[in-house]
Image (cartoon, rainbow, N blue to C red):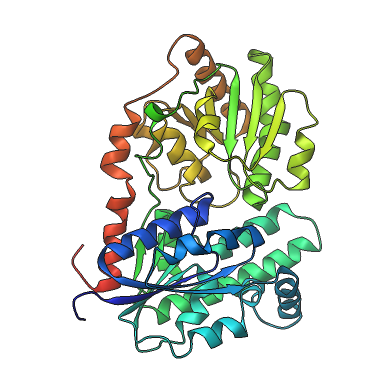
Amino acid sequence: MGSRPHVLFLVHRIPYPPDKGDKIRSYNELRALNEVADVTVACFVDDPADRAHVPTLKKMCKELVVVRLSKGRAKLRSLLALLGKGSLSLAYYRSAAMRRRLEGLGPFDAVLAFSSTMGPYADLFPNTRRVLDLCDLDSEKWTQYAGRASFPMSLIYRIEGQRLRQYEVEATRASHAATLVSAAEGDTLRRRCPDGDVRVVPNGVDLEYFDPAAIEAQGDGRTLVFCGAMDYHSNVDAVQYLHDEILPLVRKDVPGVQLRIVGSSPAPAVQRLAESEGVLVTGRVPDVRPEICSAAVSVAPMRLGRGVPNKVLEALALTLPVVATPNAADGLDLAAFEGADIAEQAPAFAAAVVRRLRAAEGGQDRFPQHRRVLVERYSWAHHMKELLALMLEQES
């Protein structure tokens, strides 16, 4: 391979700044790859605001390919795929411009495709070692959406789940290895694709950045916080569940509890929640850490999707008590954290929140021991070792 291998990193969204779930993971993968290789990054930009970050990203890699993605045209491609036999998600990111930019690049020693939607671009390099970071099984997500949607969206989601499931298996079989965040989803993919090499590479947390010692804000004892990209369907569903079914039960025991919903691009359904007394929808904030630290409890009542949401790891790193559903803690041993609870149904979730609020009123409002567990098990550096080993055929 030479002194430093040359790798291609294919990403469906610009991996900077690390301010939302997928960007946090792709940013840390890029940072890890940069330590051992020369990296060419090829990504889409679907938000005009992200163009301002292109100069910064250029400094983080050897070569940068950026292709603008028109959301209008992408949605039209998805619609046409629905009428045919293709996956809506794959059609959304299908781009002749990206293929043209990639042709002629290389040679590369390895290719990392981030998410199933970038898998087809890895096919342009058939003789190159390639790893597919699926992150999550998006087919499972669409199938879950189908179970909660009404017709005709339920049918569309179900069709997309079936089509994407087939592609995930095909892409895994065509890759040297496929990685997932969640152990449960890793097991699911192994059952579907027993001849594929499926690995689990969980999310981590930047403990230096999410250090409570650097934040002046302190919890007020009566505020719950939910953080995330608020146009993401799983997050929208979670805050609606929180607002409609959990919060009223909490307020029966602890009147005056406030809910702060923090995250970019709140969907209309989320914006409407701000009309309720005691609910604040912030939209995008320059720094999420003070928002978390000024709350008494971080909540993650996720009903859709599986994995380790960054919101949970970040709250734990900032030593907050956390109450989460099993879906928000899949792959995370919350039993190792003294200040964390798992509950699924609304009454149990509300009861756990009430216990944490009352403990906070009694002075037990922070859990510094969380950070010791995170250092040992959930640092990005720890998890990226396996990814680098897969990419560069080294011992992890």
Q: Nearer the viewer, residue 94 or 330?
A: 94
- Image-based side of 312 in relation to 179, left or right: right
- Image-based side of 387 in relation to 27, left or right: left
Which quarter of the figure has residue 242?
top right
Residue 161 in the image, given as x and y percentages of width and height: 62, 67
Q: Is residue 17 above or below residue 322?
A: below
Residue 116 in the image, given as x and y percentages of width and height: 52, 71
Q: Is residue 36 above or below residue 218?
A: below
- Image-based side of 193 in relation to 381, left or right: right
Can the viewer see residue 322? yes
As drawn, the residue found furthest toward the top would be 362
Which quarter of the figure has residue 295?
top right
Q: Quadrant of the N terminus?
A: bottom left
Q: Is residue 253 above or below residue 12?
A: above
In this figure, what is the number of numbered marks? 0
Q: Nearer the viewer, residue 111 or 156?
A: 111
Residue 370 in the image, given as x and y percentages of width and height: 35, 31
Can the viewer see residue 135? no
Q: Quadrant of the C terminus?
A: bottom left
Residue drawn at x 68%, y 13% as measured from the top left:
255
Q: Nearer the viewer, residue 297 or 33?
A: 33
Which quarter of the figure has residue 197?
bottom left
Q: Nearer the viewer, residue 133 or 1?
A: 1
Residue 238 in the image, given as x and y percentages of width and height: 64, 41
Residue drawn at x 55%, y 24% as measured from the top left:
353
Q: Is residue 239 above or below residue 128?
A: above
